[in-house]
Image: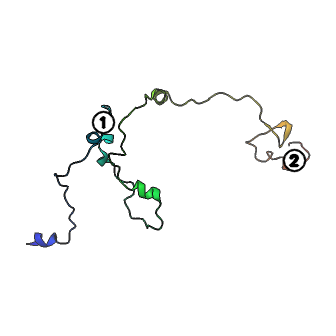
Amino acid sequence: MDDLFADEGARVEPEPSSITTEIKTSDVYKVDKNLPARFNNPECFRGYSQKMINPLYQTTNQTYGSKKPTVHEMPTTFIGSRRKFSEHLLKSGMYKDNGFNTALNKNRLTGPNETTAFHDRINFHYLYHTDGKSQ
């Protein structure tokens, strides 16, 4: 008897009926044989927006993006890329220059005859030495 009263306040979700049929893209249009299953079945895509937005602040892009696609918006052909360049970089890694820099860094602030020492915070700025000489 307690089981009958426990279910009264519970929220019951409707079960999906087996009578409804999903319309596939291949039922309406001629599609390629190598078309991925996600493009042949528009029911697997849901709208992007699930929460309610105040209609005063809702844009047309949000309205369009919240709707599920139909078979008329699904692609009928699929041409994948070979990813030859990406696969090579995945195995070997991106190029990184590990060379040793032997050139002197010249700076306009200190003049053409002075080199800048970025690690020396005291002697770096030219205003510290108004006579143009370093310590």
Q: Which mark is residue 88?
A: none
Against 49, residue 55 (above or below) is below
Label 2 element class: loop
Colour scheme of the picture: rainbow
User: Does 6 sit above or below residue 113?
Assistant: below
Q: Are marks 2 and 1 in contact (CB under 8 Å)?
A: no
State the image coordinates of residue 110 (x, y, percent, origin top left): 84, 42
Residue at the farthest right position: 131
Question: Would residue 36 appear left or right of 6 to someone viewing this image?
Answer: right
Quadrant of the snapshot with the C terminus: top right
Instruction: Using the image as rendered, state which of residue 126 and residue 4 is in the foreground.
Output: 4
For badge 1, the amino acid type reads: Lys
Q: Nearer the viewer, residue 73 or 128?
A: 73
Image coordinates of residue 59 in percent, x first then y, are 47, 60
Q: Residue at x 20, y 55 (%)?
A: 16
- Give the spatial CA distance, label 2 vs label 1: 78 Å
Q: Residues within 10 Å of mark 2 (few under 14, many from 20)?
A: few
Judged from this view, the residue extending furthest toward the left is 1
Residue type, mark 2 in image: His
Quadrant where the N terminus sits is: bottom left
Mark drawn on residue 30: 1
Count of numbered labels shown in the rendering = 2
Q: Residue at x 28, y 42 (%)?
A: 28
> Quick one: SS at disc 1?
loop
Provide the residue designation for mark 2: 129
Does residue 94 appear left or right of residue 72 in this picture? right
**In the foreground, 83 or 97:** 83
